[in-house]
Each structure stands twice: as C-alpha cells, then as structure tokens.
Image: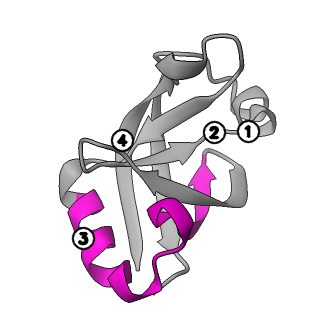
Amino acid sequence: MRIEFDSTVYRWQARQDSDWYFASVPEEFSAAIAEVVAPFARGFGAVRVEASVGGSRWRTSVFPGTDGRYSLPLKRAVRDAEGLVEDDPLHVRLDILDA
C-alpha cells in the first residue's frame, strides 16, 4: 500500500527537552492504514513503513496517536538533508510494509 500526502513538521510537546519531530498522517489515510494492517500491528500499534520526503528515503514506523491519526517520526538526518524545521510544510510518500 502506498499513500502520499501533505503535512506539517511538528515538535512532540511531551518532550520539549529533546528533538522529536513528526508529521501527521491525515485522518482518511490513517483509517485506511489501520484497516489494512490490523492483523500485523506491532507493539504500541506501530506499522513499519518506508518513507520518502524530498530526496530522502528511510525505513521507520508510524505510530497511532490518541486522535486516531498516525505520526511519522522525522529523524534529524532527514530534517537536515531536506532543510526542515518546525511548522514547515512537506510532502510525504509512505509505502506500508506491514500489509
């Protein structure tokens, strides 16, 4: 399963003392992911993905939030390579690996 969407870089509010940045997966795509991967869900509901932003591509997991939307962690190497900072818009492509 492949999805593409636009999002915004946000900093995890629970850990202001560290550099945890994410992009939210829109509700409709989050619902589709949850439906497709239900039998394969890992700890904390994590779903393995291959993510692409700009010229950067990496493997990670998306995690469900309390609002029902998945969050994609944006590691420092990706943020630096793509020049991303908090509140920046970005275009994301996710290939769902757990399906």
**Residue appearing at x 24%, y 42% in the figure:** 67
Task: Tell us which disc is closer to us: 3 or 1.
Answer: 3
| Residue located at (72% from left, 38% from top) | 75
Residue 80 lies in magenta, yes or no?
no
Q: Quadrant of residue 99?
A: bottom left
Color theme of the render = one colour
Q: Which residue is mark 4?
A: 6
User: Mark 1 and mark 2: span between their CA atoms?
Assistant: 6 Å
Q: Which label sits on residue 78?
A: 1
Residue 55 on image: x %, y %: 69, 48
**Three-letter amino acid code at disc 4?**
Asp
Mark sitting earlier along the chain (3/1): 3
- Percent across and percent down for residue 60 are 66, 59
Tag shown at residue 74: 2
3D distance between C-alphas at marks 4 and 1: 16 Å
* Separation (CA) of disc 3 from disc 1: 26 Å
Q: Amino acid at mark 1?
A: Val
* Region of the chain picked out in magenta, as a range: 29-53
Numbered tag placed on residue 4 in the rendering: none
Q: Residue type at mark 2?
A: Leu
Q: Nearer the viewer, mark 2 or mark 4?
A: 2
Say which label, 4 or 1, has the lower sequence index. 4
Q: How many marks?
A: 4
Residues at badges 1 and 2 in contact (C-beta under 8 Å)? yes
| Element class at badge 3 | helix
Label 4 neighbour load within 10 Å: few <14, some 14-19, many 20+:
few
Q: Nearer the viewer, mark 3 or mark 4?
A: 3
Which residue is under mark 3?
Answer: 32
The correct choice, above or below, for 64 with respect to 96 in the image is: above
